[in-house]
Amino acid sequence: MLRINDDIALQDWELTETFHRASGPGGQKVNKVSTAVALRFEAARSPSLPDEVKARLRRVAGWRWTSDGAVIVTAERHRSQAMNRAEAREKLRAMVLAALERPKPRRPTRPTAASVRRRLEEKARRAAVKAARAAERSDE
């Protein structure tokens, strides 16, 4: 079981870990030991998360979200399988915590009266410059 916060805990059946050989340096046993972890979380089928959190998790996960509704998190930084497992679980926990936060609603703002006045004055000034150019051409 992976505890996200006081209210949410992911059950063991929702999580699947697979192990493979990590890339990069690792000494003599790098080609013999499967220390890298791919943690798969069945997010779409999860009863632990409300639908709105699942929708936000899909946006947070990005390319890690699969077509069948799972999130795949990988970890291969450490030489120890146990440390990579802990890191993958922590990455998933951080992702779900980010999805739990409701985005602040955007309230559209209006331009100030002074900024509207400045924009219109500048627009009139540019129009006058261009009109002066056109008048010079027609005289020739």
Image: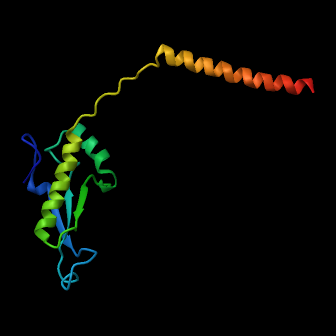
Residue 134 in view here = yes
Q: Nearer the viewer, residue 130 or 57?
A: 130
Where is residue 123, by image quadrant?
top right
Q: Nearer the viewer, residue 30 or 61?
A: 30
Residue positioned 19% across, 61% down in the render: 39
**Residue 62 drawn at (x, y percent):** 33, 51
Q: Is residue 122 above or below residue 79?
A: above
Residue 45 in view here = no
Residue positioned 22% across, 49% down in the render: 95
Q: Is residue 63 above or below residue 107?
A: below
Q: Is residue 12 above or below residue 22?
A: above
Q: Quadrant of the N terminus?
A: bottom left
Q: Is residue 31 above or below residue 106?
A: below
Where is residue 105, by image quadrant?
top left
Q: Residue furthest bottom?
A: 28
Residue positioned 49% across, 13% down in the render: 113
Q: Nearer the viewer, residue 70 or 115?
A: 115
Q: Nearer the viewer, residue 63 or 139?
A: 139
**Residue 120 drawn at (x, y percent):** 60, 18
**Residue 106 drawn at (x, y percent):** 35, 27
Q: Quadrant of the C terminus?
A: top right
**Residue 27 drawn at (x, y percent):** 21, 82
Labels in figure, total: 0
